[in-house]
Amino acid sequence: MSKMKIAWLFPDTLYLHGERGNILALERYAEAAGFDTETVRITFDTQDFDPLDYNIIFCPPGEITSFPVVLEKLRPLKDKFLEFIEAGRPLIVTGTSMAMWCEEVRRTDGSSFSGMGIIAADVSENEEVYGDDIWYTCEYNGNQIEVIGCQIQMADFISKGEAAFGKLKYGYGNTGNDRAEGFIRKNSIFTNTLGPVLVANPELTKNVIKAAAAAKGEEAGTMDLDTSIEESSFEVKKQFISTKVTRLKNCLD
Amino acid sequence: MKFYIALWYAKIINLLINIIDKSRGSNLSGEKAMKIDPQMVAHFKGIDPSKVLFITGTNGKSTTTNLITHIFRNSGKKVVVNLEGANLIYGVATALIKSSSLSGRVKADYYIFETDERYLPLIRKQLPAANIMITNLQKDQVQRNGDPDYIYRKLYSGIESPVRFFLNNDEPRTRAFAAKSDDVVYYGVERHSESFNKDETYPTMACPVCRHKIIFDYYNNDGVGRFHCENCGHASGDNADYLVTDVDFQNRNFKLRGVDFNMPYDTPYMCYNYAGALAVAKELGGIEPEEAAKTFGAFKNVGGRFEILKYKNKTIKYMRIKQENPETLQTSINVMAADPERKMVCLGLCPLIDMIPHYANSFYAFDCDLSKLAASDVESYFCFSEAVCYDTANRLIYEGVDKSKIAVANTEDINVLFEQFDKAETDNIYLITWLHTFEHMKKDIEKEGK
């Protein structure tokens, strides 16, 4: 059996919103696809971390306060991450941690710091938190997929020409002003969706595994898992979102 | 003059509330009065700031406020307090209005206020409490609070010296407040039989000082226990000033400074409330542990988190969690898992309805370790509640629970719950749901004589 190697970036510093679930989902579907899995926790103590040693990299959400410290470790690897992305391997970044991959991050106290500049977008921390459901369509790995999750928005992500990952049916997305949700570059996803997104949306997860397999020149197995619970969940949440009261106006037209 | 008009207006409101419905008086008069005098709390006379204590934090502040008030009052102290959980400035104003004379003079030995962690700095601008207790600062109400650092920053930057802190020695963010004062009293809990560890796949948390990993040697509650950061040295102190030791949950007792205490509530999270209350009793009230111990037996918590309900021949053990709060969910899961008897587990993790928009969040369940529950003797699981029920079921499946043992219903209808209770062979039923759903069930059982 071939190995699917997953890097889990700074899990104790980027530790919010139950995102360990996404690692469990990646392992579950990769194993169903016929791969052995190995998940490595990348920490401040990790020596010689090379993104190119991995098939999938997962970067969970953390507090903005933590980002400058994490960036000290990640920034020297910018070219390797770019190579990883260009090779079609999936880098999955969720929640506020998207900020680390963008250009400038402006904080509410007037300070700012630079992200890695891999995504052409700036970040503006918000005074108030916005939490809500999020529902969108996206094209990933050549497939149209619908995704539902949650969003806890601490900042706005202002695109400077970077392609959006999803088109909102409902939700705040990057700024609350339009239908843009997250960013996509090749098979790498930068999304506001929490939930954990890969547990709740098996079609997306299967395609992440397929993309990772293809990038290593292999074909993923069929991943015949019973996903009836996830499908039922999707339907009841769709119903819940469709009938609730909201003040968002960005998805009305 | 504005103050007097506000005060008298509020007193008339309180008079009317007392006639109409006493249960609605925790906030209203303060809210109305502060429309007239927005600085009203600052204008009361006779309050010595050194006798004022604010109790704040994510979990435990209501219970600790209740317990401190109980100890103080049973030791002959006159206390002004916002016991009804009205923990914004209006609740503080209302408590002062109720206790003041027509001239706005307040006469009490101590002023003890539960304060919301976001609003404490604002309240302290008007009432400069010299004493602040922080119970813990954890993941909670993410729709409003985002992440723990968001609250930590608001509180940390908003508290100006001088202040005497009462700090939980075993919670990393709380203990980091020690850097803001030379006058700190620490309280904590020794390792006990319900202390636990999580396997290393569970993230811990970022150190509030340097953002590296916090390592927990063990947890007494989720996110609270003996900890250290290998990078910067931030750690729980070797010995808290007030340490609950020799905890015996079976016989419901513990020790503090060598004094024996009865435990009115035998859940692990209560131990920190006991330690904190006893620290305040001694340091602020001059009440020795021996004296405080005499008051413990009669303590009744307001709105407790664990209740028993009889339904037909079955026992329903209701465990109240704060939705969106992994710590209280983990505590409840641990209690269920520790029960060696066969049981049915009903999980009503619900959509969040505190504010617009409502939303369907269950992701905090992935922060919780369900392995011991899954390995215990569970006859069946029932996942219910609108929109979130299937995600809850899926969390169990990810823990290795066989799907055939899980029933799911996209509803909070209590009749559906009763049907599931009836189907269970075991009479030992655990239930997590909103308090209002539980109270609805309770009333129905009483009404129908079930």
Image: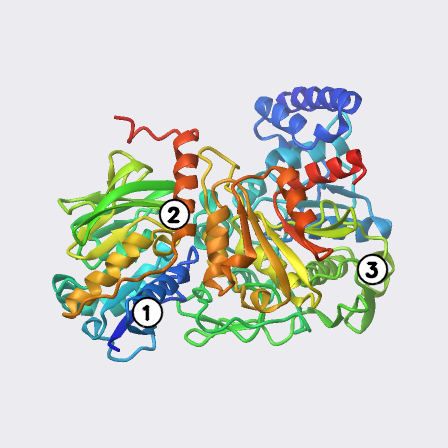
Amino acid type, callout 2: Glu
The disc numbered 1 marks a residue on which chain? A
Percent x, y of residue B390: 47, 49
Residue at image position (16%, 65%) is A214
Residue tagged 3: B292
In front of the other: B254 or B430: B430
Q: Quadrant of the N terminus of chain A?
A: bottom left
Mark 3 to mark 2: distance in Å? 56 Å
The residue lying toward the viewer, choosing from A212 and A50, is: A212
Q: Nearer the viewer, mark 3 or mark 1?
A: 1
Q: Give the chain letter at badge 2.
A: A
Q: Position of residue B165 (x, y in %)?
A: 61, 58
Q: How is the image coloured?
A: rainbow
Amino acid type indicated by mark 3? Ala
- In this picture, residue B206 sits left or right of residue A71: right
Reply above or below: A60 against B197.
above
Residue under label 2: A231
Residue B156 in sight from this viewpoint? no
Callout 3 crowding tier (Cα within 10 Å): few <14, some 14–19, many ≥20: many
Looking at the picture, does residue B113 appear above or below residue B221? above
Q: Residues within 10 Å of mark 2 (few under 14, many from 20)?
A: some
Which quadrant holds residue A20? bottom left
The kind of residue on which mark 1 rests is Glu
Q: Quadrant of residue B376?
A: bottom right
Pointers 2 and 1 within a single chain:
yes
Instruction: Residue under label 1, please give it.
Output: A31
Vertical placement of residue B402 versus B81, above or below: below
Mark 1, residues whose alpha carbon is within 10 Å: few (<14), some, or many (≥20)? some
Which residue is drawn at the image coordinates 29% and 53% (left, top)?
A203
Label 2 – label 1 distance at C-alpha: 21 Å
Question: Which secondary structure, mark 2?
Answer: helix
Do the residues indicated by labels 3 and 2 lie within the same chain of the protein? no
